[in-house]
Amino acid sequence: MSILNQTKLITATSELVRNLLKYGGGGKVVIESVSNGRDNGVRVTFIDNGPGIPDITLAMKDGYSTGKSLGLGLPGTKRLVNEFDIKTELGNGTTVTITKWKNG
């Protein structure tokens, strides 16, 4: 994986860990090595038991913040990776899964 792709993955991971701690009250991070038959990569899943995200559409808009943050936010994080999936349920937490491919 190039230095640029490593930096993108590290930046996205840092932002999501910050969200996990700040909004989700902690949780679990799972890191996996993955392959799709053409490329290898890293998949990171962030699981929290926080309050969930009330409006995913709003949370995915550039510039949206629930606090006074200059962070990338979810849309900035999504732009750094090849695959981005978010599942949330009010009262039951949020799971975000990102994948960065070696050649992507």
Image (cartoon, rainbow, N blue to C red):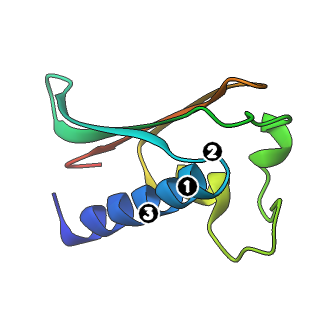
Amino acid identity at mark 1:
Leu
Q: Which mark is residue 24?
A: 2
Determine crowd level at label 1: few under 14, some 14-19, many 20+ residues with C-alpha closer than 10 A: some
- The residue under the point 74% across, 46% down is 60
Q: Residue at x 76, y 25 (%)?
A: 91
Q: Which residue is mark 3?
A: 14
Image marks 2 and 3: residues in contact by CB distance under 8 Å: no
Q: Residue at x 15, y 29 (%)?
A: 38
Report the side of 66 relative to 26 (left or right): right
Per the model, the C-alpha gap separating discs 3 and 1 is 11 Å
Given the image, on which type of amino acid does mark 2 rest? Gly
Q: CA distance from mark 2 to mark 1?
A: 6 Å
Q: Is residue 4 above or below residue 36?
A: below
**Residue 78: percent from left, percent from top:** 55, 49
Quarter in which the N terminus is drawn: bottom left
**67 shown above or below 54:** below
Residue drawn at x 21%, y 41% is 41
Q: Nearer the viewer, residue 37 or 55?
A: 55
Which quadrant would residue 29 be assigned to in this image?
A: top left
Image marks 2 and 1: residues in contact by CB distance under 8 Å: yes
Residue 41 lies left or right of residue 88; in this view the side is left
Query: What SS does tag 2 mark?
Result: loop
Mark 2 vs mark 3: in front: 2
> Which residue in the structure is indicated by mark 1?
21
Pair 3/1: label in front: 1
Label 3 is placed on what type of residue? Ser
Find the distance from the CA under tag 2 to the CA under tag 3: 14 Å
